[in-house]
Image: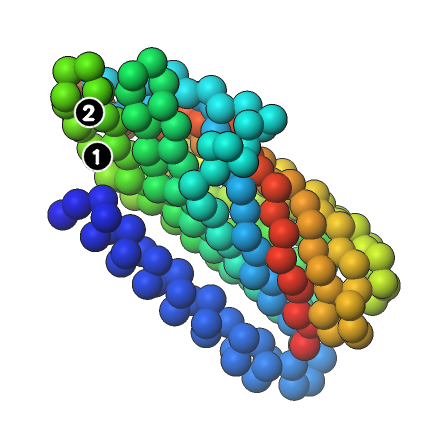
Amino acid sequence: MGVGVQKVKIWAVVTVILSAWAPAAAQAQTGDWNVVVAPYLMGASMSGNTTVRGREVEVDVPASEVFSNLQFGAMGLMIAKKGHWGFGADVIWMALGTTVRETNVDFNQGAFAFYGLRELGPAADLMFGLRVNTLQGELTFKTINLDVSQDKTWVDPIVGIRLHTPGNRRLSFGVYGEIGGFGAGSDFAWQLFPRVGLGLTEKTSLEFGWRWLDMDYATGEGNEQFGYDVLTQGPVAGFAFRF
C-alpha cells in the first residue's frame, strides 16, 4: 500500500478523534470536571539521521528555514481534570520533507499520546502514559532514479510534567516536558512545549508556542534496517476552549 493511501487513512483517524473531542468535553463538564480542548497548527523542521531499508541520509533543516521547508503539521490536545486526577490525549501529525544532496527525504510522522494526570499543586501536574508512533519514510535518490520506502509503528512509555499559570487569567503561560521510550520502543525520546495564551473570552484563548519532539528509534538489519534519530521542531498556533 502506498504512502499516499496510508496518509489518507491516518488523516481520517485523526479527524475522527479531533471531531469527537468537543462533544466529549461538553459532556464531561458536569460535576467538578475542568476540560480544555486545544487544536493547533504547526510548522515543522527537522535535523538528524534517517535510515530506510538500510540506506542512511543525514538531514539538517535549521529552524531559520522552517517556513521555506514547511510541508504541513497539525495537532490537538485535550485535558480533563476532576479534583487531583485527570486524563488527556495529544494527537500530532506532521508531513516533513527536504532535499539533501540530490535525495528527496519525505517522512510522515504521527504521534498519538494518551495520559493519566496527577495534580502536584495549583500550577503543576504529573503526566504518565504512552505514545503510539507511526512513521512513513520515503527516500528518492534522483541521480540513480531509485525510490525506497518503509513504514513503522511502535509504542513508547512516557512520563512528564506540566507547569502552568494557576487560575483563569487573560495572559497565561505554560510549559510541558516529557521523556520516554527507555528502550521499550524508542531508545530514548523527549519533548518540550512552552506556550503563551491570550484570553479572548472567559472560555476561549489564542495560543502560541514552540514545540520540540526528539526520537531515537532503530530496528532491523541490512536491507530491512529502519532508523529515525531526528529532532522535529517548529512554531505552533491555535485556540484553547475551556468547558
In the displayed structure image, the side of residue 194 where residue 70 appears, left or right: left
Tag 1 secondary structure:
strand
Q: Give the residue drawn at x 53%, y 58%.
A: 76
Q: Confirm whether residue 188 shows in the render.
A: no
What residue type is disc 2 on? Arg
In the displayed structure image, the side of residue 91 where residue 159 appears, left or right: right
In the rendered image, the residue lying farthest to the front is 68
Q: Looking at the picture, how far across and down is residue 199, in whole percent? A: 79, 64
Quarter of the view holding residue 120: bottom right
Q: Looking at the picture, how far across and down is residue 150, in whole percent? A: 21, 34
In the displayed structure image, the side of residue 26 where residue 45 appears, left or right: left
What residue type is disc 1 on? Gln
Separation (CA) of disc 1 from disc 2: 7 Å
Q: Which mark is residue 53?
A: 2
Of callouts 1 and 2, which one flags the residue occurring earlier in the amino acid sequence?
2
Q: Give the residue drawn at x 34%, y 62%.
A: 13
Q: Give the residue drawn at x 81%, y 55%.
A: 172
Number of residues whose C-alpha sits closer than 10 Å to that of mark 1, classed few (under 14), some (14–19) or many (20 or more): some
Q: Looking at the picture, how far across and down is residue 82, in whole percent? A: 68, 72
Vertical arrangement, residue 154 with respect to residue 240, above or below: above
In the displayed structure image, the side of residue 50 where residue 129 appears, left or right: right
Q: Are marks 1 and 2 in contact (CB under 8 Å)?
A: yes
Q: Give the residue drawn at x 46%, y 72%.
A: 19
Q: Looking at the picture, how far across and down is residue 151, in whole percent? A: 24, 39
Q: Which mark is residue 150?
A: 1
Number of residues whose C-alpha sits closer than 10 Å to that of mark 2, classed few (under 14), some (14–19) or many (20 or more): some
Q: Confirm whether residue 142 shows in the render.
A: yes
Tag 2 secondary structure:
loop
Q: Nearer the viewer, residue 166 or 13?
A: 13
